[in-house]
Structure formats: C-alpha cells, structure tokens
C-alpha cells in the first residue's frame, strides 16, 4: 500500500479531499464501484489467500488461540461471502440526498433537511479481515471516504483487500483515497488517528474492551462505541408459557456469544411455579449454568441453580450462563431492567396489553420487544441491509448502525433575496 | 433551594428518577405544567425582581461591565417575555411519541422507531437568568428532567426562578426533581456534573469559550457544544447585484455579535468591479471595518480597506468587521468556505441554477442558503418554536437545537412469539 510510507495525518487529509467529491456523486457511480470491488475480490482471490496465509502462519507461530485463528482465516467461500455482502450493500437505496423533511416558512423561505455523508469515517478493528471490505462498502455507499486501521495480526490480509478494493473503486470512477489503510498497529498511530479534529468525522471501534479503553483515553474526534448488551427477557403473568419458553431459549441459546443474547430472565412471581421448572430444566439440559435468586431456586428445586449474587445482575456472560430472578410486578421488572440493563435489547412476553405498554414506555433501551426474542436486534434483521455495529448510546445512533447512521444532514434554504428584519 | 445542601450526584440521581416518570407523561400534563410555570412567574415577579436586585447590586459592586449587567438585569417586561416563551413552547407539538418511521419485516415483526426523551439534560450557562426558564421549558416539553448550573453572578435570580418553576411544575402534576438547580459556580461542581455517566444523558453549555474549554477537559458524558460561526456570503457572477448587496448588509449588520452573522464576503472576479464599489462603500458607511485581498482593494479604491491577512479568513469577528476576497469561480468559493468556515451558515447569491446546486452540494455546513441571508439560522426562524443553541457538530444535532434534538429514539418491536432461526 502506498499509504504505509505517509503519516496518518496525510492519509486522513487525502481522505478528506476525496470525501468532498464522494459527497456529490450519484448512486449509479457508487453502486457500480461496489460491484466492481466485489468482482475484483473474486478475480484476485489468489492474492488475498496468499496474503492471508502469511498472516495465518505468523499467527500460528505466535501462538494465537484457535478462535482467533478462525476469525483470521479466509478461504474461497468467505471471500465469496464478503463479495456478496458488497453487492447487497450496492443494492440498498442510497441514503444520501434523501429529504428527511421539508417545509415553507411564513416568509416564503423553503427549508429542506437533507441527508448527507459525514465525510471521513475511520474504522478501527481487530482480527477479522472481512471488516476491511464490509466497512468500506458501507462507507462508500453512504458517500463517505474511509480510513481503515486493522490489527497487525491481519496486516497482510487487510493490505491485500484494501489495495484491491481501492484500485477497483478508483477504476470505477471514485476519487483516489476514497479507501485508505493506515498500516501499523501501534498505539501512537491510533492516537494520531483519533485526534484528527475537523478531518476525521467519526471513529467506529470494532473490537474488545481494550481497544475501546485505548480510544476513550485519547480520542478528540467523535466516537460511536459499539455496544455491550446485558439483555433481559421478562415473562409476565399472562404470558403464553410455551411461547415464553421458546423465546427465552432462543434469546439465550441461539448464539450466546453476541451482544443481543439474553443474560437475565425475569419471571413474574404469580407464574414462577408453573413456568420455571420446565423452562429452567430445558436451559440446564442445553448446558446453561443458572444463577437464581431465592424464589427462583425454590420454584425449580429439581434443577441445579447457583445462588445469584448482586454481580450476576450486572454481568454480560456472553456464554451459556443465565441469571434468573422472580419479581412481583411489571413495575419491578422495569425497574430491574433500567437499573441493570445496558440499554441494548429488552423483551417482555405477555398477553396483557397494559403490561406490554408499560414495558414499552418504561424501559430505557435501544430496542424493546413484545413477544419476540432479543436476538432480532441486527441491521440485517431490521431490514437495514447491513450494519457496522450496534449502539447503546442515545445521541445520533441508537441500535443498529447502518448506512443512514453513517450520514449527517444539512439544511438547504432557498429564498428570493430574503433578509431578516 | 433544597438542592444546595445535597451533592451534585444526589441531585442528578433524583433527576434520573423523575425522568423515568416524565418520559411516560402525556402532552396535556406537560403543557399544563409549562403554562403553570408561566403563571407563577407573573404572580411571583416581585420575588424574582428582589432576588435579581441582589445579584445586580453585587455585580455592580464587583465591577461587572455594563454589558454583563444588562444581561443580568430583569424587569417586569423581561419576566413577561420569559413567561410568554414558556407558553409558546407549551403550544408546540409534542416531539415525544412521534413515530419517526415504521415497517413490517418479512417475518411479520412490526418495527416502530419512536421518538423518546433523552432522560436527564444538564444546561450550564452564564449570566442570563432567563435561560433558567427557557431551558427548563424546552427540557420538560421534550420529557426530560433538567439539571441547571448557572453562574454565581446570577445565583439569587436563578435560585428564585428555579424554585418558582419547580414548585409550579410539581403542583401541576410533574414528578418532584423534574427541575433542579446545582448551586455554586465552582469548577469542582462542574466536573462532578460532567462525569455523571449513565445518569446525565446530555450537557449543553451556553456560554463563552472558557466554559467550553473547562467542560472539554473533564466531561465524560455527551456534550453538544454550541457553535461558533465563521459564515460567508458568496456573490456569484449572475447575481442580482441589488439583492446581493441587501443580503450582504443584512448578514453583516442586522446583529453583528451573533454566530449566524457573516464574517467574510466572497465575490466572483467577473463582477468585482461592478459590485464591490457600491457594496463596500455601503458597508463602510455603516461603520464596518474592511479587510480585503489585493483584488478587492483594487476594485473599490474609493473605500478604506485594510490588507487582509491569512488570519482574517479564519476570524469570527462578531463585530462590525468583514473580510473580503475575490474568487475566480464557484469552485474556488466552495473550497474557501470548506477550508475556512466553521460549518455553520453559508450563503450564495446567484441567478444560475448550476452555481446554486454546486454550492448546495459542495459546501459542508449545517445550513446552506441560496439567495437569502445567513441570519435565518435560528430555531424560531426555522419554525422549530425555540432553540437551546446551535450545533456545528455533525452527530445527532446539526443547526438549531430544539425540542426534537433533546430527544433520542427507541425501536419498539412487536411479534407473536417470534424467535430467530
């Protein structure tokens, strides 16, 4: 990559210049570029696989865990999936230029609130090299230039992918430096990237808590921190118990290691004895370690349940573990969720409209479900096409971060010589 | 105020509890409370004026400037204006509960993106005591609890206003602690307020650069910094020169000390000789000190124009001063604006659709005007009822910050036992 020889500030400044042109391009050109990137990935997959082999061998020698090696590894099938992802993003409606709202003022001025690109988006990520393409496709679709900063573990893979994508994009007519890769995984470079005020418009970290903490300490440009999820399912007294059990099992088991999986089950005291014995046995049979309060343990004496500690209510297990608590009312459930949840995804199972409405109004979270699993919180599932992460913050983006959330807006105001009196 | 005896953290925690209830209230109750606050301000204006007299006398003894004393002073008329402002905010449509969009997923899940309050909004402000009521009214209307932190200069006035408003709000049925005032103007209290992560959802500073810098150094909760405005008017070659001159004069002169006033005039070289002599003479006659580049000075030799330095292009004068530059094209004008502007309000005067469109697409700012003065950037002018400030950042709020911008949203998802496969 040409970018290895230049400073992070230079890379970002070039990206900013590219972003000025990108912001003015029509959808046709951007979509053609994304499809050209997909074509190039397939055509040049041998190059990508060679580079990936270098990373993989170095990682194995360095003693990376098999989980990390699996996340690092590419093959023909994964490359095809990445290419297909870029094509799917190309097929989405363009968020840029959408009139969010518009009105005429009493003085005759016409105001339009127009969706426009942010400018330069930086994505900082760990082992998975596919993020190089996923993040680039989402950024270009939304009219942004992207600056990528991957981990040293995947340096060769990321360099090959970024070079192929950048070349295809430029050949398709996008400005040079629409896609840039900052080489080197050092913390100095991260700090330099995170302090490009007025040049980098947003940084999105995709990685573990260590990466987020490192950014928090230095960033002066806006950051959207991807979410952690301490999610709850609350089974209210009127619930269909069969449906409730299916939702609880799905929310915990379908993919336990992700942020929208359930971590605590709340059960209305009125149905604890009828619901918990079967539900907790099924969870236990599926290998879930349970941590219950006194009433939950008493309700299901046949099942092994550790006594829950205060810490359990605040823990995102991301594993086959679940905390269980019996509550006396929907109000108590809402209070528990607001006190211990991380504002990600919260579900109530009920047949009572009043309970459903109270939970929807009272729970302070990005996504509040009635009679559905928390696992649906996802840009793809929500019909947003793809996502670059999931936000639990309240400003700008909350929930899935898709191409719209990579945009800002501006007001276009048109007059006929209007002056203010 | 009861709050003077408790810690900032306690005040914020109580506000958070109030916010849980506030978020669920209907518009009727909130609007009645705002009108009750307006009534109470009028009824108890003697108390307010007494308190204000203490602040004013202390300020005069301490040697405050007459400008600061003027901002501090209240009288019957100003109190009536503040009360009328609260009534206007009550009359606005409620932003809370608005379905921003909604759709049904292929699997039958119904998704609604619903506007909801942020929770606890903190407003940190300097001398003007009217902000106590303006900010409270905007926050309550948008379903948020508010924590106010005024300056010690206006301590008595703010305490009287906040106590009267809080009492009226509670009597009208809002939860206690919907309005709180943090007494004491110390930097320690500012730091404590700015680090209430998970409790305070947003801080808005309303004051000078010193206040913003103090916040930037310590804040861990989200902050929206009100804008500075280095705004431009660009007169393109096809412009109606009479209309152009009216817009330039309005943008510079109508209220020079505010952020949406123009600071630089850009003129197309093709019309420099026909436009500048009259326009610059008119500005000069109105008392505007001019800083021009060589071509601007040559075009208007009859008018006194200092040579512009590089610094002039980046200066927000907020005074009767204007920088003037001649450019060769709309492209050059756009580049100048993007290089030197603060992303606030930018105007082109033109009769050419191509130039208008290029400027609208190319300029990266909150508000882009065609044939109108930059002075219209204002929540009131935009029909948003009122504003709590003006944002030049790109995330969450850009342009006027009104009651919608004091909200976030959540996704409500309803199913019939849906689980993810």
Image (cartoon, coloured by chain):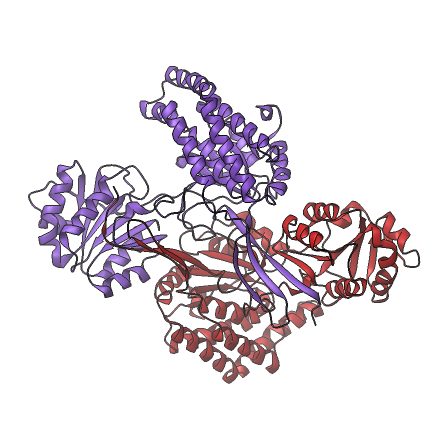
Chain colours: A red, B purple
Instruction: Please indicate whether residue A360 sits to the left or right of residue B59 in the image.
Output: right
Residue B86 point in image, percent of width and height: 45, 35
Q: Is residue B170 above or below residue B344?
A: above
Image point (93%, 59%), residue name: A302
Residue B159 point in image, percent of width and height: 51, 24
Looking at the rendered image, the quarter that the N terminus of chain A falls into is bottom left
Q: Is residue B49 above or below residue A200?
A: above
Image point (63%, 63%), residue name: A377
Question: Would you say residue B74 is visible in this rendering?
Answer: no
Question: Would you say residue B284 is visible in this rendering?
Answer: yes
Of B234 and B22, nearer the camera is B22
- Would you identify the image quadrant in which residue B188 lies? top right
Of B288 and B409, nearer the camera is B409
Looking at the rendered image, the quarter that the C terminus of chain A falls into is top left
Of A224 and B153, nearer the camera is B153
Residue A316 point in image, percent of width and height: 71, 55
């Amino acid at each position: 990559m040409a970018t290895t020889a230049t400073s992070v500030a230079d890379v970002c400044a070039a990206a900013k210049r590219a972003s000025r042109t990108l912001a003015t391009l029509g959808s046709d050109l951007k979509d053609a570029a994304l499809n050209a990137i997909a074509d190039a990935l397939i055509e040049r997959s041998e190059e990508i696989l060679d580079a990936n082999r270098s990373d993989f061998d170095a990682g194995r020698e360095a003693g990376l865990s098999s989980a990390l090696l699996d996340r690092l590894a590419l093959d023909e099938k994964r490359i095809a999936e990445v290419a297909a992802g870029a094509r799917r993003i190309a097929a989405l409606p363009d968020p840029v230029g959408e009139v969010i709202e518009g009105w005429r003022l009493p003085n005759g001025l016409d105001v339009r609130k127009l969706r426009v690109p942010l400018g330069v988006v930086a994505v900082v990520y760990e082992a998975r090299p596919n993020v190089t393409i996923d993040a680039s496709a989402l950024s270009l679709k939304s009219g942004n230039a992207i600056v990528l900063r991957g981990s040293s573990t995947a340096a060769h893979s990321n360099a090959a992918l970024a070079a192929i994508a950048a070349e295809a994009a430029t050949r398709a007519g996008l400005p040079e430096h629409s896609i840039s890769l900052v080489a080197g995984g050092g913390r100095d470079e991260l700090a330099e990237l995170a302090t490009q005020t007025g040049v980098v418009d947003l940084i999105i970290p995709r990685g573990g808590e260590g990466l987020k903490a490192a950014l928090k300490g230095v960033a002066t440009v806006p950051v959207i921190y991807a979410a952690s999820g301490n999610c709850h399912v609350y089974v209210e007294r009127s619930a269909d118990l069969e449906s409730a059990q299916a939702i609880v099992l799905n929310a915990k088991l379908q993919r336990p290691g992700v942020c929208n999986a359930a971590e605590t089950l709340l059960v209305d005291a009125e149905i604890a004895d009828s619901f918990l014995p079967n539900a907790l046995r099924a969870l236990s049979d599926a290998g879930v370690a349970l941590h219950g309060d006194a009433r939950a343990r008493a309700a299901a004496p046949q099942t092994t349940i550790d006594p829950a500690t205060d810490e359990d209510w605040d823990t995102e297990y991301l594993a086959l573990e679940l905390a269980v608590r019996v509550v006396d009312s929907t109000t108590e459930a809402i209070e528990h969720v607001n006190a211990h949840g991380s504002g990600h995804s919260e579900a109530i199972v009920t047949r009572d409209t009043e309970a459903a409405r109270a939970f929807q109004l009272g729970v302070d979270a990005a996504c509040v479900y009635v009679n559905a699993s928390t696992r649906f919180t996802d840009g793809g599932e929500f019909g947003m096409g793809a996502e670059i992460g999931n936000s639990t913050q309240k400003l700008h983006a909350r929930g899935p971060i898709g191409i719209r959330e990579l945009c800002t807006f501006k007001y276009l105001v048109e007059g006929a010589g209007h002056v203010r009196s």
